[in-house]
Image: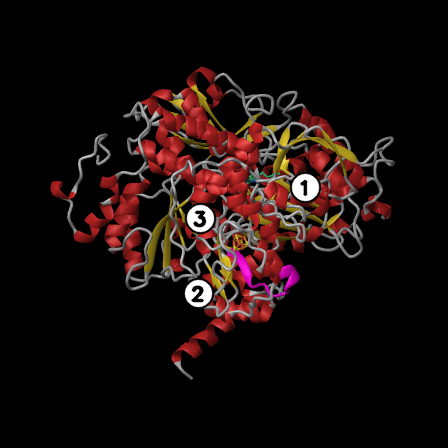
Amino acid sequence: MSHTFTLDGKTIPFTEGQTIIQAASAAGVFIPHLCYHPEFKAHGSCKLCTVKVNGRQTASCTMRAAAGMVVESETEEINAERRALTQMLFVEGNHFCPSCEKSGNCQLQATAYHLGMMSPHYDHFFPNRAVDASHPEVLLDFNRCILCSLCVRASRDVDGKNVFGLSGRGIKTHLIVNAKSGQLADTDFTLADKAAQVCPVGVILQKRQGFAVPIGARKYDKAPISETAEEGR
Amino acid sequence: MGFNELHAEAIAGVVDRVINRYRRDPTCMLQILREVQEACDWVPPEAIDRMQAVLGVPRTKIEGVAGFYSFIYTEPRGQYRVLFSDNITDRMQGNRAMMERLCNNLWVERGKVSEDGLVSVGKTACTGMSDQGPGMLVNNYAIAGLNEGRIDEIAELIRNKVPLGEWPPAYFKIEDNIRRADILLQADFKPGEALLAARARTPSDGLNASNMRSWREGLPSGIGGPAATLDELKRANLRGRGGAGFTTAMKWEACRNAPLKAGLQRIVVCNADEGEPGTFKDRVLLAKCPDLVFEGMTVAAYAVGATRGFVYLRGEYRYLLDHLNAVLAHRRRENLLGKDICGLPGADFDIEIHVGAGAYVCGEESALIESLEGKRGTPRNRPPFPVTNGYLDQPTIVNNVETFAAAALIALNGGDWYAAIGTKHSAGTKLLSVSGDCVRPGIYEYPFGVSIRQVLEDCGATDTQAVQVSGPSGICVAENEFDRIIGFEDIPTAGAFTIFNKSRDMFEVARNYVHFFQHESCGFCTPCRVGTSLLKNLMDKLHYGSGSPYDFAEIEKLNQLLQSMSHCGLGHTACNPVLDTIAKFRPAYEKRMMQQDFTPAFDLDRELSSARQMTGRDDAGAHLETEHGGAA
Ligand SMILES: Cc1cc2nc3c(=O)[nH]c(=O)nc-3n(C[C@H](O)[C@H](O)[C@H](O)COP(=O)(O)O)c2cc1C
Ligand code: SF4
Ligand code: SF4
Ligand code: FES
């Protein structure tokens, strides 16, 4: 039997064990995603990558591809729900894009543009999250954390350090660092860590690098995320 | 040596003792945290230091687990930690006034720790005592049937620092309230009988081919027994009693057929995390018939070829732990657990009890397994399913308490006997936890097919407006539907049957349930974590009188999103109570529609309440007039 499925009518080949998003991305088709990163084990928490498989919605980053699947992704119905998810992420944290160093390089912002999000729609939660500026090289601005756990996985699986973790439950879920003081300075974190590079939003920021590339010339300023995601990122 | 170091050393001693009892096994992290807390009243940072050192796990992991569970405290919470059950039935029974009274008596603010560090008073989700509420937990021990007198006495005991063990035993007496018993609750059952019956069963024709994978079938005296047991279960047509109603025999067979990697084993898990507000039947089953439940687990182990079993007991039922452990010890002495059970060579199986710590989502089977492994209770991505990759990646069956009890009876009396009870699609009986507005709340065991009306009549409910079947995740049934029946073909249920008479405000019922889901969302996935919070805010907005038809539309949109995008059943069902009550009790909502157009949720006067509190002012001049009477 052929190893293909259809995605919005297009035939997509896959190899055994590949997830839908992996196969799609190998075939050059973009599916919005925030917690998925090709180098890490899929997490399946942001739900941005949700597609309809044979009529049922499921996260494409955790769903294995199977021959003959009929997958819908770029439909108005699904994109409307994805847009609602980005709006939820915007109001859950404090995302003031114009003042954020990550603006233009931020996957959340770029995804919102891609989905045509025009307003936050929901009432803001305005959570009170303290910034951690203790580390000499890195600033942690938890206000923008979307709990994708990419830094957790990178630190655990690549750096072997377990610098990050999630604590709390429900809406109180939050990122923690591996120190009794709770401060990044008291961990063995360095700029060279993989975890220093994976944050899709503006939480883990290198200090003294502000606006090295001016806004307007940044990654997603030049082309939308659907076209810059060639490495599957 | 300074005081602080001494202190740290004492804590390290406690931690070491607990850790050693759990074989220094990091998968027991939640149990270790729980027991350290029982000794120290909270989990101090020094305890985490020690766990980190001895267990060799990163601090992020320990803090992540501790932070997930409501009953684990990484901040000092007082020597007496009082939590009032806050299910809608507790509210109907006046829990709010009780809590106020206790707070006033003890001079402590709700949710805070008293200044002397003696006591904290807060609320928690349904503690499973709806038939004898209002209820509370003190240091995780359940007290039911609260009244003003008892509250005053409790305040006195706390003020005098009387150890919990010296409180009047009557406080901790939990009634079974069995009102109607059928095959399960009146089973004339002797421990071991079901196992002997299973062993005695010889394979029927054609069964030999079904599966010979289990090592037990290679044993001379065991040949065919497990397969024959599965066969009886199939004939019985038993479906799971935990809510989803999956065919039990299919689950067991899949587990038994799952390939076993070298050195691994098959696992049997009893889901006793009963957390659905208004459900308490597993509590009664465990209190009244623990042997039947354990025997059902042992039958399951025999059928699937498992050697290790767990009971995941919800933290609210901590008070049952010592008794259940005693029953297990007795079963070991009687050779009904342990090695060569019932003299069957190689039949080895034992059961360990793990206690939860206040996280409803851990009832979801994959979250339960994560929790058993000592992790945060986050539902897993599926597939793979637990039957092939469950506890520590081993083939695992997870079944409800009542399912195991029924399985024991099926092993004893045969599948045909069982299938003849109930209806065509729903074999056997069902335990209902009846509470709310009725004369005789308690446990009712009926053959499947009983009508709502019949139950209402039996429990002495009059003037009934609505019944919430299966708790907030289930459905709300209005008067015109009372002839509907309990059964998988009509209204399936895990067991809650909560009755509301015509004096009740169904909007407030729904709002209570929405608060429950918001509190219990595990927070893993975006739609549920944020969606339940948005939903709660909308319901609160309606409650404060700022609702408009726009908010209705928003609720419906959120429901769509939660249903289609959520990761697990909690998110999928979180909007149910609201949508049901909107559809069936619209006047309760319309009463709150002060506005025909949109009204913002922000209410300036309400926002000023903290300023009023700080300044100690609450006179007219400290209030703002709002157009829609939001200050009321
Ligand atoms: C949020 C959530 C909570 C649940 N809580 C329980 C529970 O407390 N007890 C239970 O037996 N099943 C519960 N379930 C269902 C279990 O996931 C699982 O289906 C059940 O334990 C299987 O046992 P059964 O086949 O015997 O019913 C819950 C499911 C969800 C989604
Ligand atoms: S800090 Fe960044 S990478 Fe880490 S969980 Fe938050 S958003 Fe994800
Ligand atoms: S639906 Fe809710 S409870 Fe389930 S995984 Fe998502 S956040 Fe957790
Ligand atoms: S990318 Fe698939 S759920 Fe986040």
Q: Please identify the quarter of the rendering in which residue B263 is found.
A: bottom right
Viewer-nearest of discs 3 and 2: 3
Residue, disc 2: A133
Q: Is residue B338 above or below residue B180?
A: below
Viewer-nearest of discs 1 and 3: 3
| Location of residue A205 in the rendering, given as x and y in whole percent from the top left corner | 50, 60
Measured in 3D between alpha carbons, the distance from the residue under mark 1 to the one under mark 2, in whole angstroms, is 36 Å
In this rendering, does residue A176 appear at all?
yes
Residue under the point 38% across and 53% down: A128
Measured in 3D between alpha carbons, the distance from the residue under mark 3 to the one under mark 2, in whole angstroms, is 20 Å
Rendered-image quadrant of the N terminus of chain A: top right
Query: Dot 2: within a 10 Å radius of its alpha carbon, few (fewer than 14), some, or many (20 or more) residues?
Result: some
Q: Is residue B78 above or below residue B404?
A: below
Q: SS for tag 3?
A: helix
Q: SS for tag 2?
A: loop
| Location of residue B125 in the rendering, given as x and y in whole percent from the top left corner | 42, 43
Marks 1 & 3, CB-CB < 8 Å contact: no
Q: Is residue A171 above or below residue B434?
A: below
> What's the coloring here?
secondary structure
Q: Given the image, on which type of amino acid does mark 2 rest?
A: Ala
Q: Which mark is residue A21?
A: 1
Q: Given the image, on which type of amino acid does mark 3 rest?
A: Cys
Marks 3 & 2, CB-CB < 8 Å contact: no
Residue, disc 3: A97
Q: SS for tag 1?
A: helix
Q: As drawn, is A230 to the left or to the right of B146?
A: right
**Tag 2 subunit:** A
Quick one: B470 or A130, which is closer to the camera? A130
| Location of residue B183 in the rendering, given as x and y in whole percent from the top left corner | 60, 31
The magenta region covers: A156-166
Q: As drawn, is B57 to the left or to the right of B506?
A: right
Q: Please identify the quarter of the rendering in which residue B458 is found.
A: top left
